[in-house]
Image (tube, grey):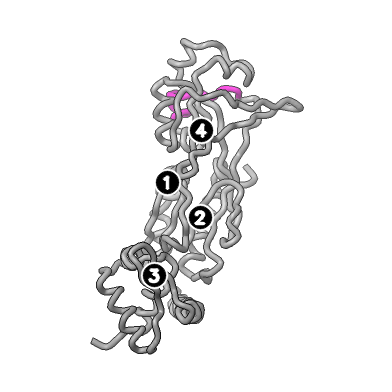
Amino acid sequence: MALDRLEAMRAFCRIVEIGSFSKAAESLGLATTTVSGQVRSLEKLLGIRLLHRSTRKVAPTAEGAAYYARARALIDEVDELESAVSQSHNVVRGRVSVEMPSPVGLHLVIPALPDFTAKFPEIRLDIGCSERVVDLVEEGIDCAIRGGALADLDLVSRAVGQMRFCFCASPSYLASAALIDHPSSLVDHRHLGFRFPGTGKRFVPTVTRGNESFTLDQAPFMYFNNGSAATAAAVAGLGVAFLARAEIQHHLNTGSLVEVLADWSMPSMPMSVVYPYTRRLSAKVRVFTDWVAGLMAADPLWSQSG
């Protein structure tokens, strides 16, 4: 079978970016043996060794690193050309892999997906919902929705909204606990804390009212690393939680959770869409990120100005 040089180049680039034949093959939807054969055929065609292979890591040779830079640019050009041709016929197609926090996925993006698929029926989404921060390049992710300050200089970011929070508890818990009339009252309550997956760092909320501020730095009664899990714990009456409004709005509406300290200002988390500097923003990713930005702008729970 003749070598498909472009697909072999694509496989080689993914191996360089991920550092693994098996993970590169998985991200491309191919068998590891197929990807390995493509690279061997490419090396034979070029007459050079592109990769250093070991049992623990795969890394490019000096010639491989130089070849990667040119090949990556060429693949991006081809992908952009195909997108441009498709757009000329009012069609944007392809697969977009995106990562996002669970509250964004479960309570904003996924419920609105029928609108997106109606507008862009030729785009196939691969959506990951979790609180972990993934390496976009290493895992072959096209873009991500992230919360908080962005420290990764290898990513292009676009501010799209805010995640808003509040303190809340179940009516049953509040009925049997001390009155919460000031943030300092929280030290006498069971606090349901949140740890960020991956880092294990605890989220410590600070609330303000006028010139007053209060930081809830007491040791939590329980820890969670998932917003839905913390919400379930609050609904079950286990304590007071600091949760994303989008996560709990339904429970506030039905009365299974009650907001406390509503007259205090709660910090919000800026939300951004990010993608790697090394990837040109393709038409398929652009229409998805534009759609997400519009979705957040139209929702007072997420909008930057709400």
Quick one: label 3, few (<14), some, or many (20+) residues within 10 Å? many
| Residue behind mark 4 | 243
Nearest to the observer: residue 8 or residue 50? 50
Disc 1 secondary structure class: loop
| Range shown magenta | 251-261
User: Cα distance, mark 1 to mark 4?
Assistant: 16 Å
Instruction: Tell which tag, 1 or 3, sits nearer the viewer.
Output: 3
Name the kind of residue labelled 1 in the image: Ser
User: Does the magenta-highlighted stretch encompass residue 166?
Assistant: no
* Circle number at residue 15: 3
Disc 2 secondary structure class: helix
Task: Point out the tag, 3 or 4, that comes first from the N-terminus.
Answer: 3
| Residue 237, visible in the rendered structure | yes
Disc 3 secondary structure class: helix
Among the 4 quarters of the image, the one containing residue 238:
top left
At horizontal 38% and vertical 89% (from top left) the residue drawn is 47
Tell me whether the residue at label 1 lies in contact with that at label 2, contact meaning CB atoms closer than 8 angstroms. no
Task: Point out the tag, 2 or 3, that comes first from the N-terminus.
Answer: 3
